[in-house]
Amino acid sequence: MSEPATGISRDDVVHLAGLARIDLSDAELDHLASELPAILEHVASVQEAAGDDVPAMSHPVPVDNVFREDVVRPSLALEDALAGAPASDQQRFLVPKILGES
């Protein structure tokens, strides 16, 4: 994106929506272009509050993994799993290349 976080343009929102594969109306694009800078400012203020002495965490309370025995059980047939995919190739989901891959 060409502009700093505080100056998000409508074109930036169009680009982000395209990356996220989200269809937005003109009104939604205009609304988000005005709202995203405030959201990013709030995220920046939260990042400033978390100093080096604050450990990173994904949950506010400790979470323990629950392990179970790995058992083979019936699941979707390959054809059923791929039936809802927009595209597939060689029995895999086909997705667009990103980040300048060739």
Image (cartoon, grey):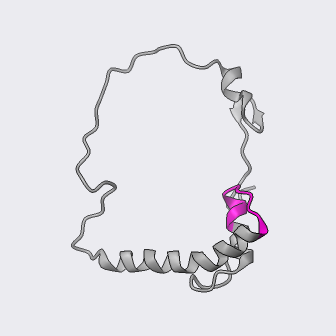
Rendered image quadrant of residue 90? top right
Is 98 in front, or is 22? 22
Q: Identify the residue at horizontal 25%, vertical 41% (top origin).
A: 64
Residue 20 highlighted magenta (yes or no): yes
Q: Residue at x 75, y 55 (%)?
A: 102
> From which residue to which does the magenta span run?
16-26
Q: List x then y, in percent, for residue 69.
A: 33, 20
Relative depth, front residue between 67 and 35: 35
Considering the image in quadrants, where does the N terminus appear? bottom right
Q: Does residue 33 appear left or right of residue 58 in this picture?
A: right
> In x, y percent, where is residue 71?
40, 16
Provide residue 89's location: percent of width, then percent of height: 76, 33
Image label count:
0
Give the image location of residue 38, x and y in percent: 52, 80
- For this orientation, the residue located farthest to the front is 27
- Residue 59 quadrant: bottom left
Left or right of 41 on screen, residue 7: right
Report the side of 83 relative to 52 (left or right): right
